[in-house]
Image: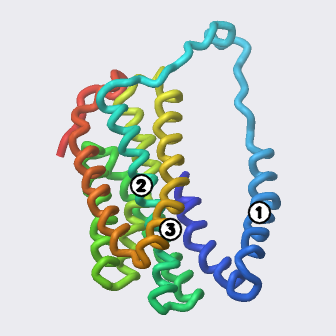
Amino acid sequence: MLVGTGVASILAPALLGQVIAEHGWRAAMLVMGGAILAIGLPVSLLMPREEVSAGAGDATSPRKKGKFEANRSSVFLTLIAFLLGLVVAGLIVLLVPMLIDGGMDDRGAANVAAQLGVAILVTRIIAGYLFDRFHAPYVAAILLLSPVVASLILLNGGPVIIAALLLGVAAGPEVDMLAYLTGRYVQMENYGASYGTILGLFCLGAAIGPMLFGWTVDMTGDYGLILTISTGVLLLVVFGIAVLGPYQSKEIGVAKTL
């Protein structure tokens, strides 16, 4: 299902780059809002609603209220989610200004951002396939090494297209990974509350990251410090995911490992 957002990541920079170049970023904001009203709102209203059959055994029984399941792995996941949102969102938002400051024109920077969308699309499919066949934390840890390499490439003035693709490898499975791992480390009756907390911390990090990164660049005058910090934080995230351990959900059973 999340392939749809990958397609949007490919099309949006290319389409909006033209609008920004000719009419400015404010016009691009209006275009995005208009697209949501014209396409997103009607589609959401036309979605079929869930119906409970009259003979369902649990139709009248009270629903058990879930809670955040505070075990070792879920607490690790909340910290991982916050740091992941903070760094990956910061790097992605910083990518285009970094390219423009390096001498690339607006359209060229938008085209590089579109390449990131290609990586997101492909990686989501690959990650989902691998998660169902191998121990997911190991797969996620390997995939999240890609933004570490991307940060090092950008820090040393390497090819930006490769760095953008590597950032896409991390941005592709991040939300998918958190949803999948939550289901493996908490019981299903607590899934909603637990994943809501974990995703909420991820979104908080994604909201703070671009502002924090931009402020740091303004204060230091270059991108070196923030790229160095990002590398260290991402290595901490990779380590945290790799040591999550065997699955704990009763519904899943014994974990498969590589």
Label 1 sits on residue: 33
Label 2 sits on residue: 173
Question: Quick one: SS at disc 2?
Answer: loop
Q: Residue furthest front?
A: 219
Q: Earlier in the sequence, mark 2 or mark 3?
A: 2
Residue located 29% across and 28% down the image: 72
Which amino acid lies under the numbered mark 2 shown in the image of this protein? Pro
Residue located 47% across and 49% down the image: 175
Q: Earlier in the sequence, mark 3 or mark 1?
A: 1
Closer to viewer: mark 2 or mark 3: 3
Label 2–label 1 contact, CB within 8 A: no
State the image quarter where residue 220 is shown.
bottom left
Label 3 sits on residue: 214
Q: Is residue 192 left or right of residue 136?
A: right
Question: Quick one: SS at disc 1?
Answer: helix
Which amino acid lies under the numbered mark 1 shown in the image of this protein? Gly
